[in-house]
Amino acid sequence: MSTTAVIPAAKNFSCDQELYAWYQQDFSDLPFEVVYKQDILRQGLAFDEQAFRGDYKTKDYFIFTFDRVPLSDMQLGENWKAPEEIRISGGPHELKPTVISVRINPHSPYKVGIYETKLTLFFQNEPVASVTFPAIPEYYNHQQEFNLTKPIGETAPVIEWGYLIYLTVFRNCQYFGKDEECQYCDINHNWRQQKKVGRPYTGVKSIPELLEALSAIDRYDTTAQAYTLTGGSVTAQLQGKNEVDFYLQYAAAIEKKFPRRWISKMVIQAWELDDCRRAVDAGVQIYHPNYEVWDKQLFAKICPGKQRYIGWETWIRRVVESASVFGAANVIPNFVAGVEMAQPYGFQEVDAAVKSSTEGLEYFMSRGISPRFTTWLPEPFTPLGQSEPAPLEYYLKLLRSYRATHRKYQLPVPPGYGPAGAGRAVFSVSAFMDVL
Ligand code: SF4
């Protein structure tokens, strides 16, 4: 690891032929679909104005921006017009359908535009795949039948091609400011930006409003199979409650009104066992105590608030212990893949970064716990926002390592993510489900 700001060498491809030849030589054991998916996730996606036509579900900004540029730099109004996700298929490589979350970057080598009248993905100006935008969920069309004060896409949006209802009930984080916030996370910056441009954002969602929105989904939707309950960390009190009481009141209310209607998932900090038991009693099935980065020293630097309040050792211990309450397969901690290469602290060599993250996979998977990962994209207002994204090579090596470790311990496909495999996966912020 280095303390100097050196950007890891990333290979840049000038054309699709060059990219494909590189893939064939070094990574042909992976489906080619994951090359575009990871490359688009780590760099972001541009749009031609002509692409914004017809009806489709637009980006609801369900928790972070995930964008590579500030909203104020989006000359085409992409923050209002871009789809939540794209699904690419066909093209010269006969791609299987592949769902990718949209992270806006007008300067990306990947762009969605029109080619021969059809929505098309371009890489370095070459058409490489057909593109579909997600349909507007049926329940969005019925929101006026319900007693809602905000657009339903603000209260209970769906992502992952309609599979996952995403309930960010607290849109800020009490790890506040650069000495506390996770250094890649723009939850608080996102809040400020969205309020500034007039998006009807809710700081703390009301339980009655949330239940009303879920009633609309219950009545009109047949696609969503799971919901995620989440938000920023609560280190002091929020509305007179500590973190455990605050979040579990939502879980309990949802499961009381809609028992087991959807798979219930919670993304939250690592809790002690008694609190985990309370979560299970409230109806939470899947627990995501995200450890973010495996390397202990990097955890302290990249997640200073979590380090100060809980600490790496306690965090990891709690993740492992929680398996006795939820069942190991239902404990799925996330790490932000690639952030361990963020400068100035991170690994400068791809293999060293993959080795470190693989140690984490080994540690958890040997105990029956399958982590998952999201793809780090440097968001501009975060302390790591000026770093370059981790190289594509890193993600492909990590996917290979993830798959091998998962196979080695003969673990089940993580529940609550929909189908696995290239052409079927809907998890949109990394390709880990595409390679299982
Ligand atoms: S705990 Fe970290 S990653 Fe989670 S919302 Fe707060 S700052 Fe962001």
Image (cartoon, rainbow, N blue to C red):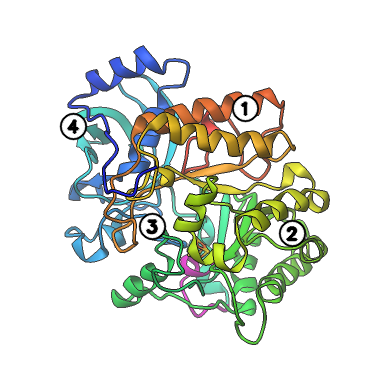
Mark 3 and mark 4 lie on one chain; the one further toward the N terminus is 3
Label 3: state its secondary structure. Answer: loop
Residue 312 quadrant: bottom right
Mark 1 and mark 3 lie on one chain; the one further toward the N terminus is 3
Q: Amino acid at mark 4?
A: Gln
Determine the residue located farthest toward the bottom in the rendered image: 240
Residue 216's x, y, as percent? Answer: 60, 65
Label 4: state its secondary structure. Answer: loop
- Report how far apart the C-alphas of labels 3 and 4 lie in the structure: 24 Å
Within 10 angstroms of label 3, few (less than 14), some, or many (20 or more) residues? Answer: many
Mark 3 and mark 2 lie on one chain; the one further toward the N terminus is 3
Give the numbered dot on residue 405.
1
Residue 96's x, y, as percent? Answer: 44, 25
Residue 51 left/right relative to 164? left
Pointer 2: what residue? 284
Pointer 4: what residue? 124
Mark 2 and mark 4 lie on one chain; the one further toward the N terminus is 4
Q: Amino acid at mark 2?
A: Val
107 relative to 18, above or below: below
Q: Amino acid at mark 3?
A: Lys
51 relative to 269, above or below: above
Q: Nearer the viewer, mark 1 or mark 4?
A: 1
- Report how far apart the C-alphas of labels 2 and 4 lie in the structure: 45 Å
Residue 316's x, y, as percent? Answer: 66, 51
Give the residues drawn in magenta, as a range.
Answer: 147-155
Q: Is residue 333 magenta?
A: no
- Report how far apart the C-alphas of labels 1 and 3 lie in the structure: 34 Å
Query: Which quadrant: the C terminus?
Result: top right
Pointer 3: what residue? 59
